[in-house]
């Protein structure tokens, strides 16, 4: 697996490279955002570690360019630790946000989590087809939404819904618990497979991105609804019950 490290501070860039090489990853390095973008255009990169404040092209701008064509995992590694910076990074498509100074053990753990998710997502993509056999036991349904756990295909009616690995895992968990109100702790522990430390932003950002893909109007969701003070519930809209 090849990881891009985009960091303008040479000491930190080299320290991260050394740690990743020790763990068996291949590493490509960039000293600024423009160099990182050039590498992404020429090399097969599986995961990117991006600083936010980089010359020529900042991390947020680089992430937006990446997300135009790729769902590859991206982790911000930055000194900008304010809550709004984290929200901005996650809402623009980052998968994680690590604040400097950090330990190499924490960096390694976060990279490992994203690599596991990537491997699951690749497995899903390899089995994708454009049709769903609704007579099979591996199909989960909720109104017009359908998720095939064998092929990884998600549809709404006749429309194919394209999800990244995290969005797919979220939807599958909700569909397996259709009609149940799920707490943020339950969602986080099931999908991220980590202890929930009251990081509401991570869950809210990813749920918002999922709603944008499955709801007719994400601002007034019909499938994935909020139960104030409790959590979230996935259920079929009233007019689609007969499709379930």
Image (spheres, grey):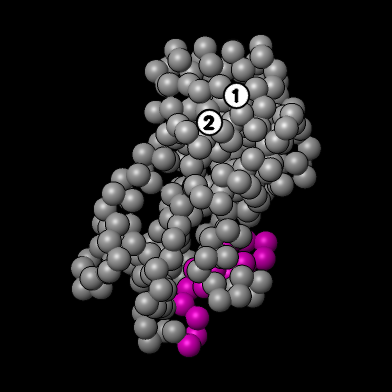
Closer to the camera, 43 or 48?
43
Image spot of residue 104 (x, y percent): 57, 17
Quadrant of image for the C terminus = bottom left
Quadrant of image for the N terminus = top left
Residue indicated by mark 1: 30
Q: Locate residue 165 relative to residue 6 in the image: left or right.
A: left
Q: Is mark 1 on a helix, strand or loop?
A: strand
- Visible residue check, residue 28: yes
Extent of the magenta region: 223-239
Q: Which residue is drawn at 43% across and 65% down?
A: 161
Q: Residue 240 falls in which quadrant of the image?
A: bottom left
Q: Residue at x 50, y 37 (%)?
A: 41
Q: Residue 168 falls in which quadrant of the image?
A: bottom left
In the drawing, what numbered circle is on residue 163?
none
CA neighbours of label 2 inside 10 A, class few (<14), some (14 to 19), many (20+):
some
Q: Locate residue 104 relative to residue 130 in the image: left or right.
A: right
The answer to if 234 sits in the magenta stretch is yes
Q: In this view, does 44 lie above or below 170?
A: above
In the drawing, what numbered circle is on residue 39?
2
Image spot of residue 113 (x, y percent): 47, 34
- Visible residue check, residue 200: no
Q: Which residue is drawn at 45% across and 57% down?
A: 163
Q: Are marks 1 and 2 in contact (CB under 8 Å)?
A: yes
Q: Which residue is drawn at 51% across and 23% down?
A: 28
Q: Residue 129 falls in which quadrant of the image?
A: bottom left
The answer to if 32 sits in the magenta stretch is no
């Amino acid at each position: 697996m090849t990881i891009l490290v985009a960091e303008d501070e040479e000491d930190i860039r080299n320290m991260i490279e050394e740690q990743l090489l020790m763990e068996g990853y291949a590493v490509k390095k960039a000293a600024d955002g423009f160099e990182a973008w050039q590498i992404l255009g020429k090399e097969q990169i599986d995961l990117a570690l991006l600083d936010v404040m980089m010359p020529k092209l900042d991390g947020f701008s680089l992430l937006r360019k990446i997300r135009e064509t790729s769902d590859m995992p991206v982790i911000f590694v930055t000194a900008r630790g304010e809550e709004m910076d984290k929200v901005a990074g996650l809402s623009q498509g980052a998968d994680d946000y690590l604040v400097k100074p950090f330990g190499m053990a924490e960096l390694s753990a976060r990279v490992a989590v994203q690599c596991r998710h990537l491997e699951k997502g690749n497995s899903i993509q390899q089995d994708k087809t454009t049709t769903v056999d609704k007579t099979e036991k591996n199909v989960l349904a909720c109104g017009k939404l359908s998720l095939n756990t064998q092929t990884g295909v998600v549809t709404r009616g006749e429309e194919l819904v394209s999800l990244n690995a995290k969005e797919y895992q979220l939807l599958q968990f909700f569909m397996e618990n259709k009609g149940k109100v799920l707490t943020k702790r339950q969602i986080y522990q099931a999908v991220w497979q980590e202890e929930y430390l009251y990081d509401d932003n991570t869950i809210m950002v990813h749920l918002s991105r999922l709603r944008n893909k499955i709801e007719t109007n994400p601002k007034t969701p019909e499938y994935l609804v909020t139960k104030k003070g409790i959590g979230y519930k996935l259920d079929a809209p009233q007019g689609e019950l007969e499709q379930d």
